[in-house]
Amino acid sequence: YPGEYSLLSIGACTLAAPRETFYVELKPVNRNQTPEAMSVHRLSMDRLAVHGLEPAQAVARFKDWLAALTPRGQQPIFVAFNAPFDWMFVNYYFHRYLGYNPFGHAALDIKAYYMGFSGVTWAETAMRYIGKRYSVKHPLTHNALHDAIDQADIFYNILVEARTLNHP
């Protein structure tokens, strides 16, 4: 959770073509880690301590990327598969290092959207079900950018299906 553990990388992309991407790795704010998390993302705390960007610089770059791609008068939308987990880190870092969050106060969770759209149970919103339905042929890599792209592809396909069913 934020404050106790470090956000080590940020990956983001636009939903529709042309696909724009953003990726940055951050210096850890402390050495706290769990074996489970380290085995998932496989980032080196030692390497990031030397080569990662300072958190304030990293989130400032993310903010600038968002601003460059968001149409004037609109707000970017934070969309993620299991958004509550990713959101808590991104929101915390934006507030801690910039004093505000360019996404505002909300995040859109792909799992919850899919559950509402399809009528499945929460258990059936797992990647093993959604990935199969939308032809994701590989597991999430847990590289922040690759996962963002995979999640954007899934969400785009869910939106296409929802629009087709609701507006033939």
Image (cartoon, rainbow, N blue to C red):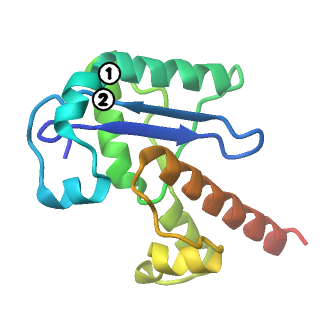
The residue under label 1 is: 53
Helix, strand or loop for disc 2? loop
Q: Which mark is residue 26?
A: 2
Amino acid type indicated by mark 1? Leu
Q: Earlier in the sequence, mark 1 or mark 2?
A: 2
Q: Residue at x 23, y 59 (%)?
A: 39
- Across and down, in percent, residue 108 comes to 51, 51
In the picture as drawn, the residue positioned furthest to the right comes out as 168
- Across and down, in percent, residue 116 comes to 56, 72
Q: Residue at x 21, y 56 (%)?
A: 37
| Relative height, residue 59 to residue 151 (above, below) | above
Distance Cα–Cα, label 1 vs label 2: 5 Å
Nearest the viewer among 47 and 34 is 47
Q: Residue at x 19, y 47 (%)?
A: 1
- Across and down, in percent, residue 51 comes to 29, 24
| Relative height, residue 99 to residue 83 (above, below) | above
Amino acid type indicated by mark 2? Leu
- Marks 1 and 2 in Cβ contact (< 8 Å): yes
Helix, strand or loop for disc 1? loop
Q: Mark 2 Cα within 10 Å, few/some/many (few <14, many 20+)?
A: many
| Relative height, residue 39 to residue 31 (above, below) | below
Kindly indicate the quadrant of the structure image that contains residue 25.
top left
Q: Which mark is residue 2?
A: none
